[in-house]
Image (spheres, rainbow, N blue to C red):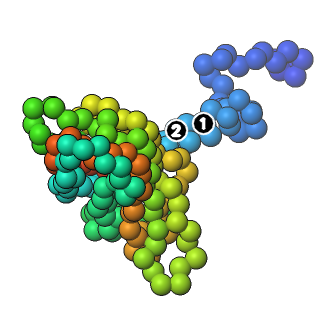
Amino acid sequence: MRDFTSEPTRPMPQAQRRPNSADPCSMSSIKFAMLVTLAASGCGLVDFDVDQAIPAQMIPGSTVPTPISTLFPVPLSLDLSSKIKQQNTGAINSVTLSSLELTITAPANGSVDWSFVDQVDLFVESTKTGTTLAKVKLASATKPTGQVLNFTVEGGVNLKPYVDEGAQVDSSGTGHAPSATVTYDGKAVFTVHPL
């Protein structure tokens, strides 16, 4: 009779080996694959943008250089609730302003640009009585030129508490009256960050 106990044990070929649950390399590969799958599915909770149109406004012109302290209105509405609900995202972590621009629409011949503005700042504040939210700077522009005024947005301003309470945007600035009456409109883009 053949004695199998005396024969040396030969290693199993690599292709026939079973994955070892105790093997850290195998476990790492499995965990990595699971993470990739979860990240790919992501439950659809990704950031999304909400556009807000700024209706047409007018700044009276003057042939005499007249300083102005209250520059012009920027009727920016922060009533974003209905647009956010359309996305079916559930709870929202934060809302931030991504971009804001104002475009001169008249005179259409380009004879007047934004160079009559020295400085303009935008602030957001709550309209709720007794609020504890402070008025904060939202965006600014310094000595703009051309037909399109692009604001520099202040980073890290979470607008969600203001949206929840009701908010208004005010502007202040310095400059002089344009040489001709100016009509402008604009667009703001908000980024919504779901939980």
Q: Residue at x 42, y 76 (%)?
A: 127
User: x%, y% of residue 64?
Assistant: 24, 44
Disc assigned to residue 4 = none
Q: Amino acid at mark 2?
A: Val
Q: Residue at x 68, y 37 (%)?
A: 27
Q: Residue at x 67, y 35 (%)?
A: 28
Q: Nearer the viewer, residue 136 or 11?
A: 136
> In the current view of this chain or complex, which residue is farthest to the front?
64
Left or right: residue 8 versus residue 124 is right
Q: Residue at x 40, y 74 (%)?
A: 166
User: x%, y% of residue 26?
Assistant: 67, 32
Left or right: residue 192 versus residue 83 is right
Q: Which residue is mark 1?
A: 32
Q: Nearer the viewer, residue 189 or 114?
A: 114
Judge whether 60 appears above or below 11 on screen.
below
Left or right: residue 126 versus residue 1 is left
Q: Which residue is mark 2?
A: 36
**Mark 2 and 1 residues: CB-CB less than 8 Å, in contact?**
yes
> In the current view of this chain or complex, which residue is farthest to the bottom?
129
Q: Secondary structure at mark 2?
A: helix
Q: Nearer the viewer, residue 47 or 143?
A: 143
Viewer can see residue 97: no
